[in-house]
Image: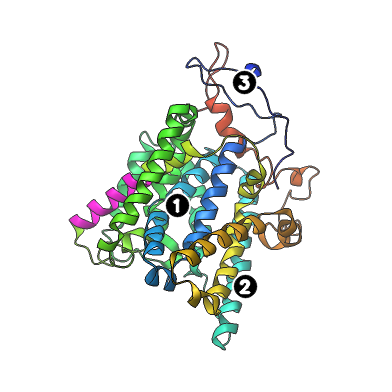
Amino acid sequence: MSASATSPATSTVDRPVEASGVPVEQPASPSARDPWLDNAKYWLIVLVVVGHAVAVDVSRQVPAAHALYLWIYSFHMPAFIFVAGLLGRSRSVEPRHLRSLVTRVVAPYLIFSVIYAGLVAVHDGRPPRVDLVNPQWLLWFLPALLFWRLTTPMVLTLRWPLLVSVTVGLGAGLIDRIGSELTLSRALSLAPFFVAGATAGPWLLPHLRRPAVRWAGGAVLAASLVAALALHDHVRGTPGAFYWDAGYAGQGLPAVQGLLVRAGMYAVGATMLVALLAAVPRRRSWTTAVGAASLYVYLLHGLVVRVFRWGPLDSHVRDVPTLLLLVLASVAVASLLGSKLVRVPLRPLVEPRLTWLLSGADRPGYWSKSSTTSSDTGRDWQASTKPASSSSRSSA
């Protein structure tokens, strides 16, 4: 999720233009991946790292950290899942897709389940306990991603896939037995954002290129952060709805209130993810490569955050200046973990090739494309957002 080679900037005069007059960014080559979504993934993974860094003691002790935490958790995972759905919007499950799921989802889940269990065991002074049914902390995202990638092609065959996924997500909260095991609650309740990325993305994204929409997106993000700073005192702790991992009863909510709260979370998440996608830069930069390698940052930053929480530095974050230092340190950690300096030596852990296990994985050229470079799914949305000509139709 290393970036493709940087291409020379294209002048506005040379760019194709939509009927609306908005320049259309073109990739450097047919295999190039548009930097826009990878830039979005960079800022989203930074929010993930910041959110985990300010959680627990910091958010309890520093009011501004509590506000920042609530703001981040109101939309960062819905937005990340939307982008994942956009990049993985294939309507079929082909052998190459399944091999990719094994090497970039299943294998990292097994590997890092052992690593995180070992880290906790060393800290607690007890034998390690690997529990694959109840994912370790942030590892819930991998089995959920596997669920979405396998089921979305079926959902897309329905007449109203987004409506169906929202209905299932709302209804899942009514069933008490759907909980954190195999991250089923999150997989069902957050599925609408993945389906939305697979269905709404191709027609939505071109509209987000308009300069006025970009300014509006930035304004929405800023206003929502100000609102969180002003209103966080009225929220005690973090509402269970922000975690998406329990039914309404588990959140202490009656059925009707739980349905309304989750519907509100859908509305907030959708609004904020659109605002963020509109506001992020379009041009290729150093953040593009880090965003493309967001899986490395996601899996590795938890180790850093665990050590931070268990060490003495956590207790020194007690005011706004030290909070700002923590935020800057989180940005630096995210940027470092997504850099080639980390990706190259740790690729066997995050993206193991498993040629000894997978049929067809030893074919020439199989590893020329990966999730960190120019994957086929990374080009799907670009093809579907180009203006249709008389001789071709959109793939949407």
Residue extending furthest toward the bottom: 125
Say which element carries label 2. helix
Which residues are the magenta region?
A: 256-269
To which residue does mark 3 refer?
12
The kind of secondary structure element at disc 1 is helix
The kind of residue on which mark 3 rests is Thr
Q: Is residue 266 magenta?
A: yes
Residue at the spot of label 2: 115
- 109, 53: nearer the viewer: 53
Residue visible at 66% across and 60% down?
350
Q: Is residue 1 visible?
A: no
The local secondary structure at tag 3 comes to helix
Q: Earlier in the sequence, mark 1 or mark 3?
A: 3
State the image coordinates of residue 281 (x, y, percent, origin top left).
56, 37
Q: Which residue is mark 1?
A: 76
The label nearer to you, 1 versus 2, is: 1
- Residue at 63% across, 55% down: 335
Instruction: Quote the CA–CA distance across marks 1 and 3.
Output: 32 Å
Camera-side mark, 1 or 3: 3
Chain-order first, disc 2 or disc 3: 3
For the view shown, which residue lies furthest in the right direction?
A: 364
216 horizontally vs 44: left or right? left
The amino acid pointed to by label 2 is: Ile
Mark 1 vs 2, N-terminal side: 1
Q: Do the residues under discs 2 and 3 have CB atoms within 8 angstroms? A: no
Q: Are marks 1 and 3 in contact (CB under 8 Å)?
A: no
Coordinates of residue 391 in the picture (x, y in percent)? 58, 12
Relative side of 26 to 359, left or right: left
